[in-house]
Image (cartoon, helix red, strand yellow):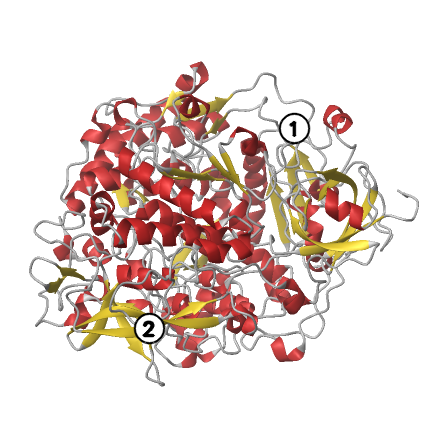
């Protein structure tokens, strides 16, 4: 950024506080916390009005037609009262054979349509999801339009104009829910009323056009019209003129530079309950201005979203896919939400979040119910899987004289076996062993740590929240009157220092630091592979992670000879992204087999169920060797399968081969050391193996029909070895594992391959989406970008209203931004760092809030809410906005943390006043891009909506 500024780049900082980046910005917009989407929606209104309607900017129109879903047709659904609401994408199977030859083709339900302006007919363009997985789609999965000119709007081609009802969430009463009538042009195709996503977008953003009925803004300064710059000013505090002007500059710069306008973000907006709507509102700006897939433009996300560059090798190593498939994978947010019983303290359900335009399908559904449904429909993983051991399923089936999978399906249907998410508090479903390494869950990342303490560990907790009242409890998840207090039997931690987590552990194994082992460091945010190398040998009893787990595996294998032996396991695997599992939910319509709406069919209406034979005596042998599945099944990443025979042979020569062990490892390449593991990753990833990248592009060419393999051609002979990374950081290779190109020395930007080579996005339409037509998205009123304010914690949980003060205490928004003075919890308690700060935990407050309740800088204060309590020192600063407090994350409580005045227990951490709150729509799966994949998709924890009450400590500080 410093270099770009020297070349004249303009920087706008959007932050509620006077953050570090504000000092270097040309302008500062300071929206109130949690209102970013309102600002973004107003900017979108400006861009749509001035660059799409008042004048049609050719660059934007061309980009939108080819790379976004704006021209795709959406059916309008008529409700019982005769009103219309946006419905499903019009797909080939809807249109019928009279309209398109694709109507009876393979996967016609997944071939959305556009209106061709040349022929004035509805057509199926190349590149849709149906093309990706159908036999007739071979060579068609690309973004080439050919003779088709997709019409962005039906205005001028319409049969009629109709009002549609669109949701809004900024009104008084009804929890902010309401709706608004807006007119759209309508065309009838195969007896169905349709309009385009673009026409719906203009209606959503309130951009009127002549001849269309409805409530429209009279101008950018109309403060009563939803999504105008003037409207957002009352919500965000950002002047409407500034919002409109900067949106205009962002768009004009994109025109002048052909897309080189960028939005750069950290993790902050990802932590709000409605984080997805915030993201979509900002992504709309980048897409409308044609910036995605352009170097110097688009979306640059830093912190919390990192991916591993050499992903194919890492994924197969981490999940032991060389020996056994499918793997067991889990989303942590859902796991801890259920197993720490935070669901038992919910005060609202999915129906509270539904839009007035919804069909009422969420009625009576709690978030815990949504989790249970997501498991049984195969949308998301959950563990344990069933209420019996998966090792016993095959034996029961054998006793019954049946095949394992049909027996299991029958048992799940009749209820004799249940999915575990339906009864997480049953003792047979408890997590019993908690093993963790290189993390500090209880001192850093456990949102709602007081519920972890109470229900998972069974120790003292400062949470005061009452459990969910009877009328709001789940209907599909068993409610046990006495919540479990303490579920795990063993906590095992590998670490090189004492943390809150190690202090609560039963067993702590000393671990090597990064100065004492071989390892790799890489993310998608920079273009190099780095290595860690031991500067000294492991001190005392410490071992590398690889050595430790190898030792555990060895002892486990020895015990297995008399305890487990060989057993048949069953794995319930969710419907996967980048597989035909994306085709499981036709039209995005939810059908629940438990309610009799369909039959339970593995891999379609429920998880894929797979038998796996496991010889537990061979765990150590398999841990320390490369298994044969890499050669027999190949390595698959993001839908591309690689033949790796020659690379595995090379690893045998580099790492050595096991001989004479009398185990499954005999004749297989070694994985006995961390260095062997690093070579595995480097040899078996396209970003570090040029031959593999070239092979992957050639495979992709067969499906897309476009030329790609030259992107890796210059590096086809390049193989990055660990020794190379020791000498210097090594640039990675352009690979189909990722969407950006670094060919010719250019820097990585996502989606450049999609834009420049016409390779589709991995979505329903093959384009970037504004519209999401899954049943749950429409029920939430979030089919299109929308503003949803922060949760009202007063109405939902009885917290004090923001700004309420009684002279002694004040209620403020409680945010936990990334710590600037530590690396997560590491170095937080460093002697020099603590001497340079306040010697312990701190909470930052505004001058106005502190003065209102008599707090001075460095005073001891106490912050409390229903989730817990924190004792800390106050940092009173002019940089802080009124009504907001910061407690920087991962301030562990290992040093200088007194007993709290309220409870006389050790003060908490930044997470003691947070808890996990799941948004049901984050659980969707089995439908296009809304499908689960490891480290790709899943629910977020969402703690930014919290409020806390802060007061000055009156009692003497006591440790």
Q: Secondary structure at mark 2?
A: strand
> What's the residue at 61%, 41% (across, down)?
17
Report x, y in % for residue 640.
27, 44
Work out which residue is located at the far right of the displayed protein and give it: 956
The residue where tag 1 is placed is 542
> What's the residue at 13%, 44% (across, down)?
705
Q: Quadrant of the C terminus?
A: top right
Report x, y in % for residue 399.
45, 72
Examine the rendering and report whether any part of residue 527 can be seen. yes
Q: Secondary structure at mark 1?
A: loop
Q: Is residue 795 above or below residue 546?
A: below
> What's the residue at 65%, 35% (across, down)?
495
Closest to the observer: 14 or 529? 14
Which quadrant of the structure image shows residue 470?
bottom right
The residue where tag 2 is placed is 164
Closest to the observer: 228 or 99? 228
Q: Residues within 10 Å of mark 2 (few under 14, many from 20)?
A: many
Closest to the observer: 264 or 340? 264
Work out which residue is located at the far bottom of the displayed protein and give it: 81
Question: Gap in Å between the C-alphas at discs 2 and 1?
Answer: 66 Å
Report x, y in % for residue 512.
61, 27
Which mark sits nearer the N-terminus, 2 or 1? 2
The mark found on residue 905 in the picture is none
Q: Quadrant of the N terminus?
A: top left
Q: Is residue 710 above or below residue 958?
A: above
């Amino acid at each position: 950024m410093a270099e770009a500024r020297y070349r004249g780049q303009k920087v706008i900082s959007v932050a509620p506080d006077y953050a570090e980046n504000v000092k270097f910005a040309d302008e500062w917009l300071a929206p109130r916390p949690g209102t970013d989407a309102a600002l973004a929606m107003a900017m979108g209104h400006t861009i749509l009005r001035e660059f799409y309607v008042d004048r049609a900017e050719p660059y934007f129109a061309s980009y939108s037609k080819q790379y976004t879903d704006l021209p795709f047709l959406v059916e309008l659904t008529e409700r019982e009262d005769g009103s219309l609401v946006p419905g499903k994408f019009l797909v080939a199977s809807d249109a019928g054979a009279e309209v398109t030859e694709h109507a009876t083709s393979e996967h016609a339900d997944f071939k959305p349509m556009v209106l061709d302006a040349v022929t004035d007919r509805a057509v199926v363009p190349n590149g849709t999801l149906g093309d990706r997985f159908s036999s007739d789609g071979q060579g068609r999965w690309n973004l080439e339009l050919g003779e088709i000119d997709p019409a962005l709007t039906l205005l001028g081609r319409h049969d009629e104009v109709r009002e549609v009802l669109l949701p809004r969430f900024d009104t008084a009463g009804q929890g902010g829910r309401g709706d608004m009538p807006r007119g759209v042009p309508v065309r009838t195709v195969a007896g169905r009323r349709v309009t385009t996503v673009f026409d719906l977008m203009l209606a959503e953003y309130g951009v009127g056009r002549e001849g269309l009925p409805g409530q429209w803004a009279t101008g950018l300064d109309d403060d009563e019209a939803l999504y105008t710059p003037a409207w957002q000013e009352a919500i965000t505090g950002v002047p409407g003129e500034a919002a409109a002007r900067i949106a205009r500059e962002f768009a004009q710069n994109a025109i002048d530079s052909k897309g080189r306008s960028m939005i750069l973000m950290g993790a902050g907006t990802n932590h709000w309950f409605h984080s997805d709507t915030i993201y979509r509102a900002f992504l709309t700006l980048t897409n409308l201005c044609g910036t995605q897939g352009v170097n110097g433009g688009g979306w640059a996300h830093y912190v919390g979203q990192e991916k591993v560059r050499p992903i194919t090798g890492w994924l197969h190593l981490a999940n032991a896919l060389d020996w056994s498939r499918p793997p067991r994978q889990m989303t942590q947010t859902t796991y801890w939400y259920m197993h720490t019983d935070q669901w038992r303290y919910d005060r609202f359900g999915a129906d509270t979040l539904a839009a007035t335009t919804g069909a009422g399908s969420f009625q009576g559904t709690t978030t815990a119910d949504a989790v249970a449904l997501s498991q049984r429909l195969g949308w998301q993983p959950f563990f344990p899987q069933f209420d019996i051991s998966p090792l016993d399923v095959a034996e029961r089936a054998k006793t019954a004289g049946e095949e394992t999978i049909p027996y299991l399906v029958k048992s799940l249907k009749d209820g004799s076996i249940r999915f575990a998410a339906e009864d997480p508090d049953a003792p047979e479903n408890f997590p019993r062993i908690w093993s963790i390494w290189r993390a500090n869950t209880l001192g850093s990342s456990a949102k709602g740590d007081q519920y972890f303490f109470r229900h998972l560990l069974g120790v003292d907790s400062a949470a005061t929240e009452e459990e969910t009242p009877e009328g709001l409890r789940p209907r599909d998840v068993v409610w046990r009157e006495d919540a479990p207090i303490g579920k795990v039997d063993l906590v095992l931690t590998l670490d090189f220092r004492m943390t809150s987590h190690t202090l609560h552990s039963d067993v702590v194994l000393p671990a090597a630091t990064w100065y004492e082992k071989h390892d790799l460091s890489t993310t998608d945010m920079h273009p190099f592979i780095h290595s860690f190398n031991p500067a000294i040998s492991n001190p005392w009893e410490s071992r590398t992670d690889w050595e430790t787990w190898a030792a555990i595996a060895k002892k486990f294998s020895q015990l297995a000879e008399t305890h487990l032996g060989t057993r048949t396991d069953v794995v319930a695997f969710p419907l996967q992204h980048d597989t035909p599992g994306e085709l499981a939910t036709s039209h995005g319509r939810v059908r629940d087999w438990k309610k009799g709406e369909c039959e339970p069919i593995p891999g379609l209406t429920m998880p894929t169920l797979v038998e796996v034979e496991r010889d537990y005596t061979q765990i150590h042998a398999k841990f320390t060797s490369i298994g044969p599945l890499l050669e027999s099944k190949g390595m698959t990443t993001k839908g591309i399968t690689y033949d790796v025979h020659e690379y595995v042979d090379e690893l045998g020569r580099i790492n050595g081969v096991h001989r004479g062990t009398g185990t499954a490892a005999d004749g297989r390449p070694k994985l006995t050391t961390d260095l062997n593991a690093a070579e595995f990753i480097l040899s078996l990833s396209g970003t570090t193996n040029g031959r593999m990248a070239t092979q992957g592009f050639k495979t992709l060419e067969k499906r897309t029909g476009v030329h790609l393999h030259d992107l890796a051609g210059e590096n086809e002979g390049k193989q990055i070895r660990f020794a190379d990374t020791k000498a210097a950081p090594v640039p990675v290779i352009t690979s189909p594992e990722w969407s950006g190109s670094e060919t010719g020395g250019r820097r990585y930007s996502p989606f450049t391959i999609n834009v420049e080579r016409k390779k589709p996005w991995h979505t329903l339409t093959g384009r970037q989406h504004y519209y999401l037509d899954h049943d749950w998205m429409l029920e939430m009123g979030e089919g299109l970008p929308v503003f949803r304010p922060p949760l009202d914690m007063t109405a939902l949980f009885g917290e004090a209203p923001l700004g309420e003060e009684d002279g002694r205490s004040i209620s403020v928004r409680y945010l936990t931004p990334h710590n600037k003075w530590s690396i997560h919890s590491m170095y937080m308690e460093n002697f020099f760092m603590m001497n340079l700060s306040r010697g312990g935990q701190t909470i930052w407050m505004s001058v106005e809030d502190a003065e209102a309740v008599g707090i001075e800088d460095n005073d001891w204060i106490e912050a409390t809410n229903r989730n817990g309590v924190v004792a800390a020192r106050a940092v009173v600063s002019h940089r802080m906005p009124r009504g907001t407090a910061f407690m920087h994350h991962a301030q562990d409580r290992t040093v200088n943390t007194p007993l709290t005045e309220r409870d006389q227990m050790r003060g908490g951490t930044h997470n003691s006043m947070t808890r996990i709150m799941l948004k049901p729509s984050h659980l969707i799966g089995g439908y296009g891009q809304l499908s689960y994949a490891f480290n790709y998709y899943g629910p977020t924890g969402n703690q930014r909506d919290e409020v806390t009450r802060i007061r000055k400590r009156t009692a003497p500080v006591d440790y």
